[in-house]
Amino acid sequence: MFKNKEKIQLNTLSIWILFSFVIAAAGALFAWVQISGYEKGVMEIYATQQDAYVQFVLDQVNLNQEAQDESVIIDIIGTLDSSGNKFWTLSAEETLLFVKDVLETNRYKGFTTKTYYISECAEHFIDNLSLNKVTHSLVELNDKEYIASGAEFLYQGETYQICLLTNPEVVLDHNAYLGAKINLCLAIAVILCVFAITVIALARKSSKKSRQLKEEKEKNTNLTKMAEQLNRELSMNNLYDAGQAVFQAEFLPMFLEKLKKDEYLPVTVMLLEYDNEKTLSFFLEDCYLMLNKKIFRFRDDKNKKIFLVAVKYDGKEAVKAVDWLLYREIRLVGTECIDGKNGLTLEQVVNKLCRAEEE
């Protein structure tokens, strides 16, 4: 049984440990999703600002509609943006006219847009640009993601597509943002670790307390059983040892139950009344010293009565044995003998004596 309880406690502790790890993992996953969502929000804010920058370039191009070729557009881009973190493209129809990348080369000149925007998402973005309305999206080029902002515009009767692409790492790897992100991740990791350790520690403590409580309950149960057994043994010893001065009347039914066999007959039951406790005390002292051990005494303090049960005594012998101990303040009020011939039981005799005394 003890091994089974130990196994149950270990299983309970394992469940709590598993629970702490599952909750910590769920918390980490939730934090990762929230941080990813936050980064997307940051990129969305940056993309909106980038749209405004593209719109500003577009407005400058529209102000120079009198120029004869697209070189004016290229000059505007080069003048307004000298950053190496941005990538500009200019195309007409499907022909790539200009690419200003980090190396500021024209190595893509003569390429088509499908050659440069080779991924499906980038091609879809280019094909769905709106006239004089800047839109943005996250596209993939050469296995890297970029924030793309672009629009279509008319120049000298021809439709052009202009796009600005920025690597998100420029924003997300900024020292201030990256430091705040690392600190946030560390704080979340510490909180989840503290949570898991706390749950495990509390589970271990609870398991230990539960084990101690069960051990205490087992000890109390064993002590209670021992006390009950001792009480039963003392009761049985008192029941058959007439050397004790007197027994409580509550033991009388148990005693009568033991005397149902014929080998104890005849049995005489005598009912006595007394006036006060002092009288009772003297009488019991006399009985203890003078009466035979076969005469048992049961006191009923509530009704001021004493039952004397004389085993192997007929009526005359029993009265003779106790008569000389009686006086005015303690009186014999009834006697009944059971010899197996009158058909009376001990319970009936006791009830009969009590009724006769009341009458």
Image: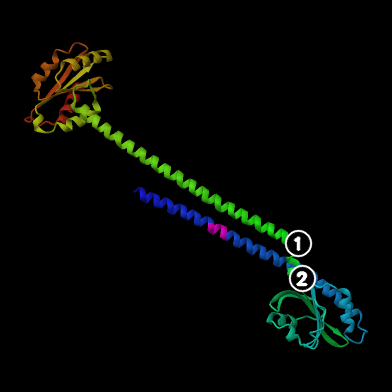
Q: Position of residue 74 (x, y in %)?
A: 87, 81
In the image, residue 358 sits, relative to residue 328, either above or below, namely below
For the rendered model, the colour scheme is: rainbow
The residue under the point 55% across, 57% down is: 23
Q: Which mark is residue 175?
A: 1
The quarter of the image holding the C terminus is top left
Q: Position of residue 148 (x, y in %)?
A: 76, 75
| Mark earlier in primary sequence (1, 2) | 2
Highlighted range, magenta: 21-25
Q: Which mark is residue 47?
A: 2
In the image, residue 201 sits, relative to residue 131, either above or below, namely above
Q: Check disc 2 and give the amino acid type.
A: Ala
Q: Check disc 1 and give the amino acid type.
A: Asn
Which is in the foreground here, disc 1 or disc 2?
A: 1
Q: Which mark is residue 73?
A: none
Q: Quadrant of residue 266?
A: top left
Callout 2 crowding tier (Cα within 10 Å): few <14, some 14–19, many ≥20: many
The residue under the point 51% across, 56% down is: 19
Q: Quadrant of residue 295?
A: top left
Q: Position of residue 158 (x, y in %)?
A: 84, 88
The residue under the point 57% across, 57% down is: 24
